[in-house]
Image (spheres, rainbow, N blue to C red):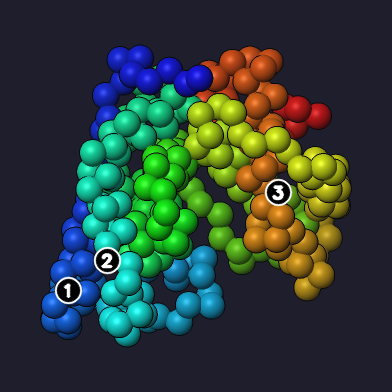
């Protein structure tokens, strides 16, 4: 079990304005509220993420993104009851989640950003020192307790990126070496957050996942100067959407580090190059 407390005081600001105004819009139908939401820091946060990482989502401004997420209004009305419930739950338990996230960050780490509670965008995302959590996601419809796990995941991301000096990789890369670095970073990011999310006891690794992951990683890592092809990019789908290998294998790497060096070894690995996280277990 992870230690809760240990003298660390939550420091991440909890911002509920986005989801509260979204609920007000859905209750009243007042479209002027959409412009209010678009002016919020939480809307800018998810817009910045979408611009950089979600090329399929065509929105040229925070307002366009907000309209995409909340209209037509009718299709979201059935979500109102569980989003209100989730909002109440989040206000009560986010501090608890934050303490858990801090256990997998270096001792004395202080958050400098916010967690935005939103409506409609992904499960949650990180961008810079801030993170967000979508209280309207279907995964939270049945069981609000899952909010704690996912809040831990996204809060850990915010700490991770802060410790990386705000660095988040872009996808405008051209060589296999750059792809290896991208894979290492995202394995490190998602693996440590998944380990934290599951309270240091992530689900067992699927059969053959370890070998499959390292076959892909080594393909890029061992030929760093070769140019990327379209087929090379297809391999990323296996790591992310299809089999989520950088989540599952990354969590297994964190588990091995925990057994060998303890939780502090995982926490302090964040300050070092992500390729070291990968090589630490090979």
Q: Is residue 221 visible?
A: no
> Which is more foreground, mark 2 or mark 3?
2
How far, Cα to Cα, is label 2 from label 3? 34 Å
Query: Mark 2 touching mark 3, by CB under 8 A?
Result: no
Query: Mark 2 touching mark 1, by CB under 8 A?
Result: yes
Residue 16 sits above or below residue 247 on the image: below
Q: Is residue 134 left or right of residue 237?
A: left
Label 1 secondary element: helix
Spot occupied by residue 172 in the image (x, y as percentages of width and height): 61, 66
Dot 3, how many residues are within 10 Å of its Cα: few (below 14), some (14-19), or many (20+)?
A: many
Dot 1, how many residues are within 10 Å of its Cα: few (below 14), some (14-19), or many (20+)?
A: few
Label 2 secondary element: helix
Spot occupied by residue 139 in the image (x, y as percentages of width and height): 47, 56
Q: Is residue 92 visible?
A: yes
Q: Earlier in the sequence, mark 2 or mark 1?
A: 1
Which residue is the site of mark 1? 27
Spot occupied by residue 279 in the image (x, y as percentages of width and height): 75, 32
- Who's the residue at 56% across and 54% down the image? 169
Which residue is the site of mark 3? 245
Of residue 206 and residue 162, the one placed in the foreground of this image is 206
How far, Cα to Cα, is label 2 from label 1? 8 Å
Q: Earlier in the sequence, mark 3 or mark 1?
A: 1
Marking on residue 80? 2
Residue 29 sits above or below residue 196 on the image: below
Label 3 secondary element: helix
Q: Quadrant of residue 41?
A: bottom left
| Image quarter hosting the C terminus | top right
């Amino acid at each position: 079990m992870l230690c809760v407390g240990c003298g660390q005081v939550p420091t991440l600001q909890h911002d509920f304005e986005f989801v509260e105004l979204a609920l007000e819009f859905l209750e009243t139908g007042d479209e002027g509220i959409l412009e209010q939401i678009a002016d919020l820091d939480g809307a800018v946060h998810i817009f910045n993420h979408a611009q950089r990482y979600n090329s399929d989502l065509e929105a040229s401004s925070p307002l366009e993104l907000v309209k995409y997420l909340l209209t037509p209004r009718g299709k979201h009305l059935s979500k109102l009851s569980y989003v209100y419930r989730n909002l109440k739950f989040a206000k009560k338990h986010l501090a608890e989640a934050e303490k858990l996230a801090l256990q997998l960050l270096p001792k004395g780490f202080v958050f400098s950003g916010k967690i935005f509670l939103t409506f409609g965008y992904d499960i949650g995302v990180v961008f810079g020192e801030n993170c967000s959590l979508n209280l309207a996601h279907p995964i939270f419809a049945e069981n609000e307790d899952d909010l704690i796990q996912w809040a831990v995941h996204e809060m850990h991301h915010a700490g991770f990126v802060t410790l990386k000096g705000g660095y988040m990789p872009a996808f405008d890369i051209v060589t296999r070496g750059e792809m290896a670095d991208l894979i290492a970073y995202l394995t490190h990011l998602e693996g440590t957050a998944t380990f934290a999310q599951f309270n240091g006891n992530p689900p067992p690794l699927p059969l053959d996942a370890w070998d499959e992951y390292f076959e892909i990683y080594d393909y890029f890592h061992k030929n760093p100067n070769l140019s990327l092809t379209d087929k090379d990019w297809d391999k990323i789908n296996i790591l992310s959407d299809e089999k989520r290998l950088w989540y599952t294998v990354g969590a297994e790497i964190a588990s091995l580090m925990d057994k060998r060096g303890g939780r502090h070894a995982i926490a302090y690995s964040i300050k070092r190059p992500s390729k070291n996280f990968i090589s630490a277990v090979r």
